[in-house]
Image (cartoon, rainbow, N blue to C red):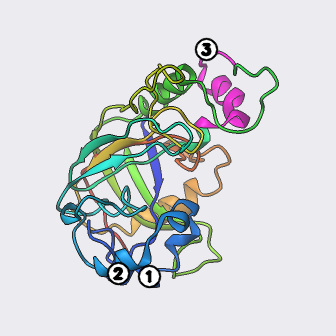
């Protein structure tokens, strides 16, 4: 059974073409996401409006993992440790065209850990904190095992990737999911790790969500070919009502709203329907 992936994109007024928005400070939809709201510099982005990410001089916007999704041009991204108190060394990655760096947040949450291990028949140890039942999976070895199993489900040239916006969109904010496009995954990047910091953080930590020690994200790449309105039907009839992020019909959809980064490249049919 082929496993598919869904990934959220923050709203972009140039259709995720690898550039800064044409009107960055007027994009009131991307700041629904906290990391955008906390990190966006309106003055700086307005001065760079419409510029390719690849031509920015030593800085990147907080949305930098998303706008390359449908871009014909790649660029070099810097993955920064989301936990400022650790100050782990950042890691650079060359992102090819038509790529994103999604993160499977659900898989990296303690409240989902036991049911995921049961469903997936995983033998992974419990948290170092015996009574911990909420929050991020923090231990690097547990993160690595979860990430290995999550990303290992995807198949190049077979798995699909569904791009969506949540309520941060100008189309219909009452809708929890707006499908933007769908494509086939053509390449899956390596699991990357933040640098170590002795003596407190001697273990390599994957990139990931706010309290994570790992880079749960990987690069996923595709190649864009055509618009497909069929994807909207697939999403609405088979996947939206899935409590565990799985389609109710035969394909499995890995719901990315819960845990890991890894870059991925796609190929096949895709199309941003808006803007």
Residue of label 1: 25
Which numbered disc flags the more N-terminal residue, 2 or 1?
1
- Marks 3/2: CA distance? 49 Å
Left or right: where 133 falls relative to 30: right
Q: Which residues are magenta?
A: 108-126
Residue drawn at the location 23% of the way across and 74% of the way down: 51
Judging from the image, what secondary structure is the residue with disc 3 in? loop
**Looking at the picture, how far across and down is residue 136, in whole percent?**
65, 37
Q: Does residue 34 sit above or below 130 in this rendering?
A: below
Do the CB atoms of the residues marked 2 and 1 lie less than 8 Å apart?
yes
In the image, is residue 124 part of the stretch drawn in magenta?
A: yes
Q: Secondary structure at mark 2?
A: helix
Mark 2 residue crowding within 10 angstroms, few (<14) / some (14–19) / many (20+): some
Mark earlier in primary sequence (1, 3): 1
Based on the displayed image, in which of its 4 quarters is residue 130 positioned?
Answer: top right
Q: Residue at coordinates 53% horizontally, 19% vertically from top-left? A: 141
Of 266 and 45, nearer the camera is: 45
The answer to whether the residue labelled 3 contacts the one labelled 2, judged by CB atoms less than 8 Å apart, is: no
Q: From the viewer's perspective, is the residue at label 3 or at label 2 nearer?
A: 2
Q: Position of residue 53 (x, y in %)?
A: 25, 64
Q: CA distance from mark 1 to mark 3?
A: 47 Å
């Amino acid at each position: 059974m082929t496993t598919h992936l869904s990934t959220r994109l923050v709203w972009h007024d140039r259709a995720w073409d690898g550039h800064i928005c044409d009107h960055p400070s007027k994009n009131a939809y991307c700041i629904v996401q906290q990391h955008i709201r906390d990190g966006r510099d309106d003055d700086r982005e307005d001065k760079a409006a419409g510029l390719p990410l690849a031509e920015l001089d030593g800085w990147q916007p907080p949305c930098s993992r998303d706008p390359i999704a449908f871009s014909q041009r790649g660029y070099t991204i810097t993955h920064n440790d989301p936990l400022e108190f650790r100050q782990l060394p950042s890691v650079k990655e060359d992102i090819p065209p038509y790529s994103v760096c999604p993160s499977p947040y659900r898989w990296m949450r303690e409240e989902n850990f036991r049911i995921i291990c049961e469903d997936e028949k995983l033998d992974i140890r419990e948290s170092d904190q015996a009574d911990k039942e909420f929050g991020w999976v923090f231990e690097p070895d547990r993160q690595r095992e979860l990430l290995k199993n999550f990303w290992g489900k995807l198949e190049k040239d077979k798995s699909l990737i569904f791009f969506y916006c949540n309520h941060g969109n100008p189309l219909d904010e009452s809708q929890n999911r707006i499908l933007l496009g769908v494509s086939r995954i053509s390449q899956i990047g390596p699991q990357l790790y933040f640098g170590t910091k002795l003596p407190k953080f001697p273990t390599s930590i994957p990139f990931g969500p706010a309290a994570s020690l790992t880079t749960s994200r990987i690069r996923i790449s595709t190649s864009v070919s055509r618009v497909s309105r069929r994807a909207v039907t697939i999403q609405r009839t088979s996947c939206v009502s899935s409590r565990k992020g799985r389609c109710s019909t035969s394909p499995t959809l890995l719901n990315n709203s819960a845990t890991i980064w890894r870059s991925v490249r796609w190929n096949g049919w895709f199309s941003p329907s808006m803007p």
